[in-house]
Amino acid sequence: MKVVVIGGGKATEYLLKSLNEKKHNIVFINNDYDYCKNISKKYNVQALCGDGSKEYILEEADINKEDIVIAMTNKDSDNLVICQLAKKIYEVGRTFAIVSNPKNVDVFKKLGVDRVISSAYIVAELIEQVTTINEIHNCIPIEDGNIKILELLIKESYYINGKLLKDIYLSDEAIIGFIVRGSKSIIPNGNTRININDKLIILSSSNESEKIISNIVEGKKSEEEI
Amino acid sequence: MKSKNYIIVAGCSRFGANIASMLSKEGKDVIIIDKDKDSFRKLSNDFTGFKIEGNAADIEVLIEGRIEYAGTVVAATGDDNVNIMISEIAKIIFNVEKVVSRLYDFDKEIVYKDFDISTIYPAKLTVNEFEKLIEKDDDNYEKEKKGKFIKEILNSRLKWGEVR
């Protein structure tokens, strides 16, 4: 399996570095010859100089069905065409596109690209959550933002501090998947006690996060109410 | 609510501007979109349609141009990939009846597979035209050759006549 990365810039380089560490077979495509040379030397990857939205360049990259194609050029339309060529000519199963215009996430999905990522969208979501809700340390939207992974640090004043998990109600659409305690990670069960400075990793549907926070901080509204 | 007479031309290239001017003259409702407002001067003076300054591959600009009512969308920007994106948005998302796209690169035709999108290939048209011209030249050349030959025969006959 090969990973074909088309694009350039900081995000691309970071990805190349991380893929390289995991020993993936990488082909990098960019239309600037010197940049290709530079990247090839720096990250020890196979670099191909040319326009990634041209069929003969993809041909040269020797793409197969089981490969992964990641289009992250700064032009959304180029990324669309790269993914579609990969899909329609080489029947690539997994195509990813990074878009700069967040509105294109929906557009690309309707046009058949498997995964579309908009950094602007993710960053905006994250900033909104972290700034508007004090208690949230971190928040990662997945499944197009329908599901969120929340990261919360337990403080002394919180209602659930010192309680057993089985005595706590968060929401019907949320689960505490992990508790990080110091350097230890605990997979919680009903008899796990929540301590101060624990970090909870919560998986929830996206519109439940405020309710969850209030249940954690102020305590559960009695179940009859719910 | 879709109207046959409502046409969006994306990209005010020579091609786009001429088509938009022509359709406008025919009395159609034309919207032309280009990201550079200077390019609108390529439109003829009697163009009566609307001009929108913006990136036509941005779905919001197309919505501003009321693409949901359009009967025809012409993708005429100078960039193949942008044309592909516009055409697919028009056809697949807004279900526009007639979508025409200009493509320079034959190899990209495959992305339109399964979609009902008409394509114009300037390169192909140029080649066809070139062939026609060459054929014509060849014909002329043949005719000239024949002409010369006939003249020579005539001349030789004349000479022969003189001798006789």
Image: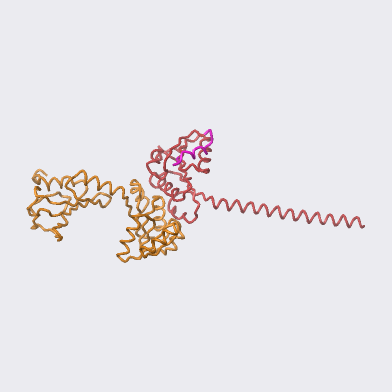
Chain colours: A orange, B red
Q: State the image coordinates of residue B114 (x, y, percent, origin top left).
A: 43, 53
Q: State the image coordinates of residue A82 (x, y, percent, origin top left).
A: 41, 55
Quadrant containing the C terminus of chain A is top left
Which residue is at the far right? B164
Q: State the image coordinates of residue A208 (x, y, percent, origin top left).
A: 18, 46
The answer to whether A161 appears left or right of B109 in the picture is left
> Where A156 sits versus B33, above or below?
below
Q: Is any part of residue A106 visible from this angle?
A: yes
Q: Between residue A93 and residue B55, name the one nearer to us.
A: B55
The answer to whether A69 appears left or right of B83 in the picture is left
The answer to whether A160 appears left or right of A143 in the picture is left
Q: Tell how many labels.
A: 0
Q: State the image coordinates of residue A200 (x, y, percent, origin top left).
A: 15, 54
Magenta-colored span: B33-46
Q: Is any part of residue A165 visible from this angle?
A: no
Quadrant containing the N terminus of chain A is bottom left
Residue at screen point 40% across, 55% down: A84
Residue B111 lies in the magenta-colored region = no
Q: Between residue A165 and residue A89, name the one nearer to us.
A: A165
Q: Between residue A160 and residue B98, name the one nearer to us.
A: A160
Residue B44 lies in the magenta-colored region = yes
> Where A84 sits versus B49, above or below?
below
